[in-house]
């Protein structure tokens, strides 16, 4: 019999990474950046020039190796791609000591 384990919704947390929330946010941002680049049919070099990154650094980010790239830089990349970026801080949550971080993409 094969045993299955219910995911938390965050693969990084499931794997025990200390910075799981940050890694999930970065993965979501990198995915959106990749989608935009693909839709524009840009080469990695063209995209890197627009984003202010080296081509090798962009390549690593698009392959999920984004530990050396800050969330702020990834948000800047989205802005350079013509996307509006808003950071919203909501009210305190009840019955919990910690808030949550989530990425929401509008249509």
Image (cartoon, grey):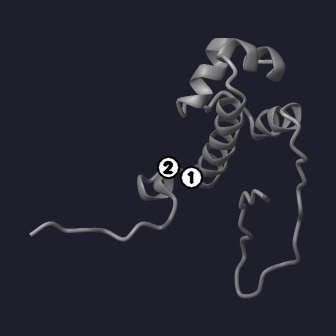
Q: x, y (%) of residue 7?
A: 42, 66
Q: Residue furthest left?
A: 1
Query: 90 left or right of 46?
Result: right
Q: How many marks?
A: 2
Instruction: Give the residue displayed 68% in from the left and 43% down from the top.
Output: 32
Query: 42 left or right of 23?
Result: right
* Residue tagged 2: 17
Q: Residues within 10 Å of mark 1 (few under 14, many from 20)?
A: some
Instruction: Determine contact: label 2, label 1, CB under 8 Å.
Output: yes
Spatial CA span between label 2 and label 1: 5 Å
Q: x, y (%) of residue 67?
A: 61, 32
Instruction: Give the residue displayed 84% in from the left and 78% down from the top.
Output: 92
Query: 99 left or right of 2?
Result: right
The quadrant of the rendering that contains the N terminus is: bottom left
Q: x, y (%) of residue 64?
A: 54, 34
The quadrant of the rendering that contains the C terminus is: bottom right
**Quick one: 28 or 72, which is closer to the camera?**
28
Q: Secondary structure at mark 1?
A: helix
In the depicted structure, whether residue 4 falls above or below residue 51: below
Q: Secondary structure at mark 2?
A: loop
* Residue tagged 1: 20
In the depicted structure, whether residue 94 falls above or below residue 86: below
Q: x, y (%) of residue 66?
A: 61, 32
Q: Residues within 10 Å of mark 2 (few under 14, many from 20)?
A: few
> Picture quarter containing residue 74?
top right
In the depicted structure, whether residue 16 falls above or below residue 69: below
């Amino acid at each position: 019999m094969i045993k299955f384990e219910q995911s938390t919704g965050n693969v990084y947390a499931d794997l025990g990474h200390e910075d799981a929330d940050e890694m999930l946010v970065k993965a979501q941002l990198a995915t959106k950046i990749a989608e935009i680049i693909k839709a524009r049919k840009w080469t990695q070099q063209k995209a890197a020039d627009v984003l202010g990154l080296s081509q090798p650094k962009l390549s690593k980010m698009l392959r999920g190796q984004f530990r050396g790239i800050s969330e702020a830089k990834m948000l800047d990349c989205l802005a350079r791609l013509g996307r509006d970026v808003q950071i919203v801080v909501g009210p305190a949550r009840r019955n919990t000591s910690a808030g949550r971080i989530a990425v929401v993409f509008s249509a």
